[in-house]
């Protein structure tokens, strides 16, 4: 129904940002929100994804309209 798929990232550490970069290679993907409990990670993710909204509480990201897909980047341990 939409021309673009709105994605939200929960967990903007190394793994989450890496996987998100692979999603962003598709022109149909638009990063609309990023979330991390560490503010510096959220800030870095926002600079790499202009136009996205930043959150430190994942529930607020999930409540955002226009999110079609959520990527959860968890630590490998």
Image (cartoon, rainbow, N blue to C red):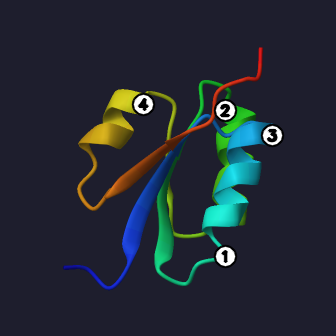
Q: Secondary structure at mark 4?
A: helix
Can you tell which of label 4 and label 2 is closer to the viewer? Answer: 4
Of callouts 4 and 1, which one flags the residue occurring earlier in the amino acid sequence? 1
Can you tell which of label 2 and label 1 is closer to the viewer? Answer: 1
For label 4, count other residues whose C-alpha is less than 10 Å away and answer few (under 14), some (14-19) or many (20+).
Answer: some
Tag 3–tag 1 contact (CB < 8 Å): no
Q: Is residue 66 left or right of residue 42?
A: left
Of callouts 4 and 2, which one flags the residue occurring earlier in the amino acid sequence? 2
Q: Nearer the viewer, residue 76 or 59?
A: 76
> Which residue lies under the disc numbered 2?
39
The spot of residue 2 in percent (x, y) is 25, 80
Tag 2–tag 1 contact (CB < 8 Å): no
> Which residue lies under the disc numbered 1?
25
Residue positioned 49% across, 73% down in the render: 29
Q: What is the distance, in whole Å, between disc 4 and disc 3 at their CAs? A: 18 Å
> Which residue lies under the disc numbered 4?
58
Q: What is the distance, in whole Å, between disc 3 and disc 1 at their CAs? A: 17 Å
Q: Secondary structure at mark 2?
A: helix
Q: Secondary structure at mark 1?
A: loop
């Amino acid at each position: 129904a939409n021309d673009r798929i709105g994605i939200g990232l929960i967990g903007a550490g190394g793994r989450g940002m890496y996987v998100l970069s692979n999603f962003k290679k598709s022109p149909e993907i638009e990063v609309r929100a990023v979330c991390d409990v560490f503010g510096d990670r959220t800030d870095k993710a926002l600079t790499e994804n202009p136009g996205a909204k930043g959150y430190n509480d994942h529930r607020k990201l999930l409540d955002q309209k226009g999110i079609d897909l959520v990527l959860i980047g968890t630590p490998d341990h």
